[in-house]
Image: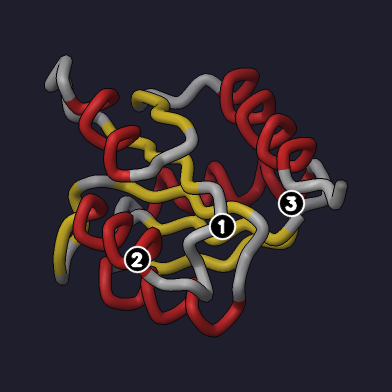
Amino acid sequence: MKVLLADDDRVFVEHVSTRLREKGHTVTVAVDAMQAFMFAMKNLPDVIMLDINMPGGTGSDVLKKLKLSAKTSHIPVVVVSSEQDPALDAHVQKLGASRFLRKPLRFDALYEALERQAVGNLPK
């Protein structure tokens, strides 16, 4: 599975990328909001992991743009954030996110979310 990991926390990115690659996924990393949108448009990943707080715009802004584009609207987006706002989960799902996960990330929850996205995207 091709995963676009959009997060500006380099330690988090390194840790998650390593774990995903160990599971056989191909990972592309974007470190800011503009780069995340550009990479999504260019690479058309199978799933996007998107942080909410990034330089160059918010994850919410990127999510809105992704869902408005016919080219990327079908790509599942898993939002990952350390924000403690209890309304954030509902907010990002209303914008079109497939799943919301809090940091610190539980890898079992991440693997489950990716597995659900893979199954959900199988041709019918």
Q: Which residue is located at x 50 percent, y 67 percent? A: 72
Residue 73 position within the rendered picture, expressed as x and y whole percent measured from the top left: 48, 61
Residue at which label 2 appears: 68
Residue 103 position within the rendered picture, expressed as x and y whole percent measured from the top left: 35, 27
The span from disc 2 to disc 3 (Cα, nearest Å) is 30 Å
The amino acid sitting under disc 2 is Leu
Residue at which label 1 appears: 74
Q: Residue furthest top?
A: 86
The amino acid sitting under disc 3 is Arg
**Total marks drawn?**
3
User: In which image quadrant can residue 85 be found?
Assistant: top left
Q: For this rendering, which residue is in front, 101 or 15? A: 101
Q: Any mark on residue 21, and which? A: 3
Image vertical order of residue 24 relative to residue 107, above or below: below
Image vertical order of residue 115 relative to residue 28, above or below: above
The amino acid sitting under disc 1 is His
Q: Any mark on residue 27, and which? A: none
Query: SS at mark 2?
Result: helix
Look at discs 2 and 3 and give the one toward the viewer: 2
Quarter the N terminus occupies: bottom right
Q: Which residue is located at x 27 percent, y 58 percent? A: 64
The span from disc 1 to disc 3 (Cα, nearest Å) is 23 Å
Q: Which residue is located at x 28 percent, y 35 percent? A: 94
